[in-house]
Image: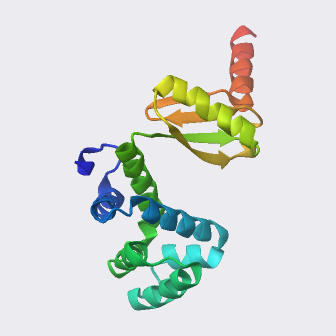
Amino acid sequence: MAAEDTSVSGVSGRYATALFELARDQKVVDEVKADLDKFEALLNESVDLKRLVRSPVFAADAQTKALSAVLDKAGIAGISANFLKVLTSNRRLFAVADVIRAYRALVAKFKGEATADVTVAEALSDKNLDALKVALKSVTGKDVALNVKIDPSIIGGLVVKLGSRMIDSSLRTKLNSIKHAMKEAG
């Protein structure tokens, strides 16, 4: 059932599907998602952890020992910890970010939610995030989870990717459109 989702494919999709099915069978889907979110936050905060995850230089046993210490300190245990250790022993830890993304997609589909990737120039207030969720829910008819990314290069506005649809109301895109129009006119 979950494997039919076209949004997850490749190595990361297969691992995410296996984890999701295991978590679903044991009724711990949300707990595993919370653990993966916590691990992703650690990954984003630590250059050393990123190096450990991405570098092929580390032997699998050294990676497993280091990862075990990180997981113990972070309080990540159970299925999530075992899964991350399996990724490590199979030399697939480098794909963990893609696996987490694919797992989130499977959870969203399971719960009847949609996920939107939102790029903004600066952090949005809770009021603006809620308004965006309400607007997206009115379009999709589903609850929408937001993955917000801050990218100052868009100058202002926002870019929303929801499934196969993309809405680009960034100031950078509008300025580029004006620039191209002026080139054609002059």
Name the residue rendered at 74%, 37% in the picture. 127
Percent across and percent down for residue 107 are 40, 51
Residue 118, image quadrant: top right
How did the renderer colour the structure? Answer: rainbow
The answer to whether residue 148 is above or below residue 30 is above
Residue 26 screen position, x and y as percent: 30, 66
Q: Residue at x 50, y 68 (%)?
A: 35
Residue 145 appears anywhere in the view: yes
Query: In which quadrant is the C terminus drawn?
Result: top right
| Image position, residue 48 (x, y; %) | 62, 79
134 shown above or below 117: above
Horizontal side, residue 125 vs residue 131: left or right:
right
Number of numbered discs overlaid on the protein picture = 0
Image vertical order of residue 24 relative to residue 141, above or below: below
Residue 159, placed above or below residue 73: above
Q: Is residue 167 visible?
A: no
